[in-house]
Amino acid sequence: MANDLSLYAAIGSGVAALVSAWFAYLSIRVSKRSLCLSEQQEERHRPHLVPYLMDGYVKFVAHENLRVYGFSLSISNRSDVDDSVAQIELQLTYKAPSGISIAVKARHDTKLNNVFAGGNMAMLPIPLRIDAHQTIAGWVYFGIKEELFRGSAVDKFTIILTDSHDIVSTVEPIIVRELVDETPKS
């Protein structure tokens, strides 16, 4: 009888251990799912601006000896939190006649809005607030003195957006069309 009691106690302990192991396994699976959901939620709260280039032009302004670049951008905020664009820059890379590769940066200049279409195009002001899951579109303008390009052609354009968290997003225009002022001189 005492042997039977110790056998039942051993079987009961084994069953209890198996049940405990099963609940521990289920608890681990639930914990992993919770961790995965928490990481996904954290990722959605991380600022993430995505620029998209719609169009790009360059125009030479003779009386100021200035190349003015205008780009139509849309900027999407793909995160669950509001963000803002703190700065927009254009980086031009070109080869000097000596063969040295040079990079020049210019900041978005709202005063250049009137160079294209008489200032009638929607411009992106800086700083620019972009709410969660919102897209904003408009034009950005950059002016660079013509003297920098003597005997050189631009190899690469890069538009650099820096948000309020110092996170950088870039877009590289492939084709920038030149506008020529064809108004007759009187």
Image (cartoon, helix red, strand yellow):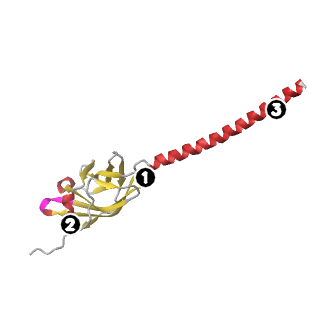
Taking depth in this image into account, of 181 and 5 the one nearest to the observer is 5
Identify the secondary structure beneath mark 1.
Answer: loop
Q: Is residue 72 visible?
A: no
Span shown in magenta: 63-67
Marks 1 and 3, how far apart at CA? 53 Å
Residue drawn at (43%, 48%) of the image: 45
Q: Quadrant of the N terminus?
A: top right
Identify the secondary structure beneath mark 2.
Answer: helix
Amino acid type at circle 2 is: Gly
Outermost right residue: 1
- Which numbered tag is attached to residue 11? 3
Residue topped by disc 2: 119
x, y (%) of residue 161?
Answer: 32, 52
Marks 1 and 2, how far apart at CA? 34 Å
Q: Is residue 140 visible?
A: yes
Amino acid type at circle 3 is: Ile
Residue drawn at (70%, 36%) of the image: 21
